[in-house]
Amino acid sequence: MAREAQAPSNDNAITDDNNTGELPPPLPPRRQLSHEGALQVAPAQSKPTTAVSSIDISTLSFPDGSRGTFSTSRVASASASGHATPSREALGYAAGGGDFNDSMSVMSFAPTLRPPGDLASLVAGEINRKSRAWMLLRSQSASVQPFKSVEPDAPKGLPGFHTEFDDIPDYDAKGTPTADEDRLALWKSKMKHYLILSSAGKPIYSRHGDLSLVNSYMGIVQTIISFYEGAKNPLLGFTAGNARFVIVTEGPLYLVAISRLSESDAQLRGQLDALYMQILSTLTLPTLKNIFVHRPSTDLRKPLEGTESLLSSLADSFTKGSPSALLGALECLKLRKSQRHSINNTFLKMRSDKLLYGLIVAGGKLVSVIRPRKHSLHPSDLQLIFNMLFESGGIKAGGGENWIPLCLPAFNNSGYLYMYVSFFDGNPENTSTEPVQERAEDDEDEIAIILISTDKESFYDLKEMRDNVAQQLNKSGSLAIIKAAAKVGRLPISAIAPGAQISHFLYKSRANVQFCMPSLEPAFSGPAKMVARRRLMSLYHQLHASMHAKHSHLKVLHCVAADAASLAWVTPIFEFYCVAGPNVSRAIMAQGANKILQWAKREEERLFIIGGGVF
Amino acid sequence: MADSANAPKPSSSVKLVLLGEAAVGKSSLVLRFVNNDFQENKEPTIGAAFLTQKCNLPTRTIKFEIWDTAGQERFASLAPMYYRNAQAALVVYDLTKPTSLVKAKHWVAELQRQASPGIVIALVGNKLDLTSDGSGSGGDADSAGDDSGDARKVTTEEAKAYAEEEGLLFFETSAKTGYNVTEVFTAIANAIPETSLKSARGAGASHAASRTEEQRVNLNGPRDPNAKEGCAC
């Protein structure tokens, strides 16, 4: 609390001052990898990640080997952060950084933690002056995990989020119909709504509540939107109470998102675009246009019949918080470069002439991609495919092999492609390469092979290709490798950056449009897993919004709030976001961040698919 | 007969297609037949699913290659791709929904017009567990929310009369309880003329097949180019 009061005087952003040209950046030697954890007594200046002075200078090593120096005068960064982060201010974020926090990190020196080498010289003189009790207290507070300090009932604790995905019942437990007022109250208690309606006001989709319940609201929404449309001044969004309404108009469709989860307009707009893409994926753009040209009052629910579950699973992944959707990037299965190479080659060798794209996916993570030289796959299209296969139950539950007509709107929104999908048995002991007909529910490590063609008659060609690929992968042992890697899952953060006090991070490789993250265990698990996860994702959403706010040009952003400290860092090569406990100092965070970035650089060819198989 | 138990039985594959309105239980029937499993609130099939299951008859083994199609209207134009060259079809309706029988009749007519001549068609009324005469085995949960306990809207007599008129096999089933499900597939397997099976060893008696071939005009050929134009909308 005390820190929050002090906050406004501190800056919370470190901006890149290289552009001004006034201060030639100092070039301290690069931090070495080898001395992690070892106590080093050396001049503080040679330690690139720490600088404690009235003008903050921190030099950070980029993973590509270059260095950047960020120095901030108070005045400059105050204005920068003012531009970039209006939403954070409104949400009660206290600015962090500055001398206060760095001295906190000095206090947090404790025998149980390996002291970071670059702090040793600072710590040496200071530490003995404090009493033992004080040290113990500080050592405990430093290990507080993010979000642990917030009461679950406080607004930021997301009360009621655990019932967010429950259905609104037509009947109560005794079988008597639920009163409309009760159902409406339940409907209003949801923190996130998505409504889709036609410009004529016909309801098309609502995430919560049946359409009879929300019909009148659809009417109101249509009236409001068309009023602004009529005035040639389209309504983009508005705020009512603590809910933000964002509206997207796509031809004959109105899409509305209503959120109380502190997402930015741009993020909500992205989510609505994804729902629109799902509709296009079902119908194609020319068909959608035709339907409404001939009869503007058409009820689109009929042509979209059966896709409600796809829209809902997509909507729910946004409400739960999807790093993939936030970053517009995909996650890959971590494999050795040579292993991935051999899988790609097998895949390419067995390629059918009918094939457009071929993918192997394990538990929603990409294993291998093959594609024609002149076509690449767009992440938003893959998001639709992954949603269909892994989030919604339609295909997983059915079993067997699937042949699905679908439109990939980012590839070509006017026609259908045909997608062959089958799953392998995820069990590493099972060496059968037959398509699975029966699958255990809730299986995280399912491996799917996806073959996409433009020819709707090519099912048997692609099935033959799949059988050949499966046989080869099994013979070469690659299938077992994929299964094992899928079973291992994401690495815990302790294995990525030992000793770093960072609880979680997102790393996006901008060139590859892919991201990686550590396991959500153990910091974001437990009974209130979904809530903890949503709070983590909300924080990432806020960081992301601040970094990508128009005119902000932020490179590095450090925030401290009562519940967590966070750091965002964007360069042309990567976007990096990380979260730590509220008492972790900026220096420690920056150090942890560097460790992770070095790891990401080192492991780049394992974490990401670079290029993929091209034919 | 006696020594046929030891010798491997001739085996042949049969292409079977399921057609019918959305949400009548096509996938649930297949799931019951293939995995002996049932899922409440199964999500709709997208496109079509391809599954296989063997059916053992006294004299031979039939390997069903099952095309479980999606019932939504927008997939209707893809159906010819699935019933082309099919030797058997399961046309499914929902006993509690009269419009689904109307749709089933449309599918039967389309199959008789355009599918392979000699295709074995079975008309199946599903969701027997929702009716009061629903086999009595466990289908007690009245999930349809109907108070009467009998949600039947299509009488056995009506559907049976139609099936006899068109020369179809007829069954009422419950994918939920499993009642009559295997029987449908066994009956189809038995009804498929031995001669139309592409059996490796079924060299004999192929002359009987050609008779049925000649009786019908094959509309399949001229239809094909049209089918190509169709889209999934």
Image (cartoon, coloured by chain):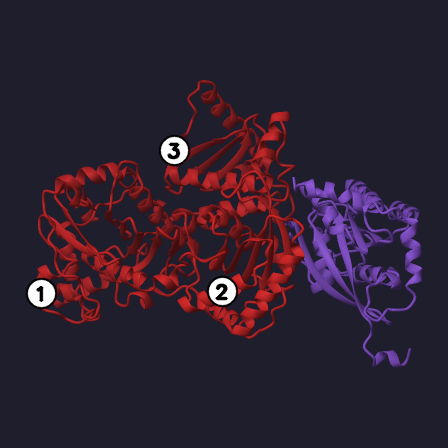
* Residue A129 found in image quarter: bottom left
CB under 8 Å between discs 3 and 1: no
Rounded to the nearest angstrom, the CA distance separating label 1 from label 2 is 53 Å
Specify the label residue A345 is tagged with.
2
Q: Which residue is mark 1?
A: A121
Q: Is residue A256 visible?
A: yes
Could you say which disc has been placed on residue A241 in the image? 3
Q: Residue at x 53, y 35 (%)?
A: A196
Task: Report the amino acid beneath label 3.
Answer: Gly
Can marks 3 and 1 be said to lie on one chain? Answer: yes
Is residue A521 visible in the rendered image? The answer is no
Question: What percent of the width, then of the height, locates residue A73?
Answer: 12, 43
**Mark 2 residue type:** Asn
Instruction: Tell me what hue chain B is rendered in.
Output: purple
Chain A pictured colour: red
Question: Left or right: B230 with respect to B1?
Answer: left
The percent position of residue A101, horizontal first and vertical second, equals 16, 53
Q: Residue at x 88, y 81 (%)?
A: B3
Dot 2, crowdedness within 10 Å: few (<14), some or many (≥20)? some
Cα distance between the residues tagged 2 and 3 = 56 Å
Work out whether residue A453 or residue A124 is closer to the camera in this orientation and state it. A453
**Badge 3, how many Cα within 10 Å: few under 14, some, many 20+?**
few
Confirm whether circles 1 and 2 share one chain.
Answer: yes
Give the foreground label among 1 and 2. 2
Q: Is residue B108 left or right of residue A454?
A: right
Q: Which of A121 and A22 lies nearest the eye of the viewer?
A: A22
